[in-house]
Image (tube, helix red, strand yellow):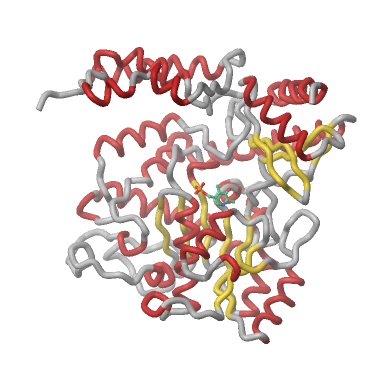
Amino acid sequence: MPETFRNDDFLRVLKALEAWEGASRERSTPVLRQPPMADLARELDLEALLASGGLAERLEDFLETYLGACHRIQHPASMGHQVSCPEPAAVAAAFVDAFTNNPMAIYEMGPAAATVEFAVVNWMLGKAGWRPQPWPGQGDSRLEHGAGVLTHGGSLAQLTALAAARARACPQAWEEGVDPSLVVVAAADAHYSVGRACGILGLGRRRLLEPPVDAFGRIDPQGLDAMLARLRRSGRRVMAVVANAGCTAAGLYDDLRAIGEVCQSHGVWLHVDGAHGGAALVSPRLRHLLDGVELARSLIWDAHKMMRAPGLCAAVLLRDHEDLDQAFRQQASYLFHDKEQPGFDAISRTVECTKAGLGLKVFFALAAGGEQAMAAYVEGRWALAAEAARAIAESDDMELAVMPQANIVCFRPEGMEDDAVLALRNGLVASGAVYITTTAFAGRRWLRLTFMNPQTIMADVERMLDLVRDAAKNI
Ligand SMILES: *Cc1c(COP(=O)(O)O)cnc(C)c1O
């Protein structure tokens, strides 16, 4: 078979990416161009390339068109979604992983990748205040310790954590199906993947119950206490309480210590969704936001959000390793069998069968500058959000939804109706000058900023606010 791609073709790709990244950092470049899909397919000449090949000869042209229609996450005015602006070292890790392609959920299919993931998970367990997993063959693996696995995204991590909670609350569920008395308690502001997991796990959306919350959607611990008592009296069994460590809409943190103590007193599993805000665990200055997380039984934490790993890479972490071992109780004789081996097979702990070496991406992101550099990055983005929020709160034509606790800011032009906020956002995004999102929060619709990009500075925020003001005049 002829080689389709040579080393210098890789270099051609790298060169195109370098030029693209350089342009993406220029503030005069549009963040985003959205051509009609059919036009783009034609410009890329997809059908001809699919049928006849020959990509290498047309690489530069193809990449120019392709990259020209990419969302430029690296652009300082990309302040929309919670997607990492990848650390260059982590991008190199993704390349190494793609090149070696080791499905490391079985040790013998990727000893290096499995070892790196094990170490990364242990590092994360330590940040949560939980005991790390002993290296296979060293120490007593039966002693209480945590466990975790990296998965393809927070949604899958959520499902995995809740599957573990289900196995504890209802061990027969795997064979017999779910007991009808089982419920999950999660606030309306919980990420939609919680409801999805409940559907997938056979509880059904209607058994997802909302706890009392404050005006900003944060769980009221006393109200939760009363609710759990009520549920017990009525014969319901609570599989898990889900708390937010950075809710999706506004990045607010639930009071994990108070909620954890309530859950503990009722013997209920606390699951913490730290997909976005878990990153505060890296910073000694911000860790207080997750104070009490150690009382939880499970935590999810995306590395492809605030840990600068490219997608996908999320951690599901459990305080007690047995919980993760019970989450999936299936047997596949060609994969799961007793063997003498120097490593560990993560496969019994994951939804995935073939699983990429995700740990290398987080590891490179961290090892490039060490934990302190990561902490400085997270602190910097949190600080920019606080500064932006102050500027908005002090202006006389903008309204701030709530003082941010993370790097997410919700605001709108003073008094603007919900429909107008949506229209304004759509117009701004279509212009390509800036990328922001919108969310419902505390009963209203808001414009929403998420500061992920280390290049974004306050001047970019000011420019964005001026664009919002201009757009507001024409709504
Ligand atoms: C992003 C997010 C998720 C889902 O994670 P994915 O990696 O996008 O699947 C879950 N919860 C919260 C709070 C999030 O911000």
Instruction: Name the foreground residue: 82 vs 59.
Output: 59
The quarter of the picture where the C terminus appears is top right
Instruction: Name the foreground residue: 57 vs 169.
Output: 57
Residue shown at the point (73%, 68%) measured from the top left = 221
Residue with the most extreme front position:
38
Q: In the rendered view, does 333 fall on the left or right side of 364? A: left
* Tag count: 0
Residue shown at the point (67%, 65%) measured from the top left = 257
Q: Position of residue 270 (x, y in %)?
A: 58, 68
Above or below: residue 220 compared with residue 459: below
Residue with the most extreme left position:
1
Q: Position of residue 454 (x, y in %)?
A: 58, 29
Residue shown at the point (48%, 58%) measured from the top left = 125
Q: In the rendered view, does 361 fall on the left or right side of 158? A: left
Residue shown at the point (23%, 25%) measured from the top left = 51
Dividing the picture into quadrants, the one containing residue 194 is: bottom right
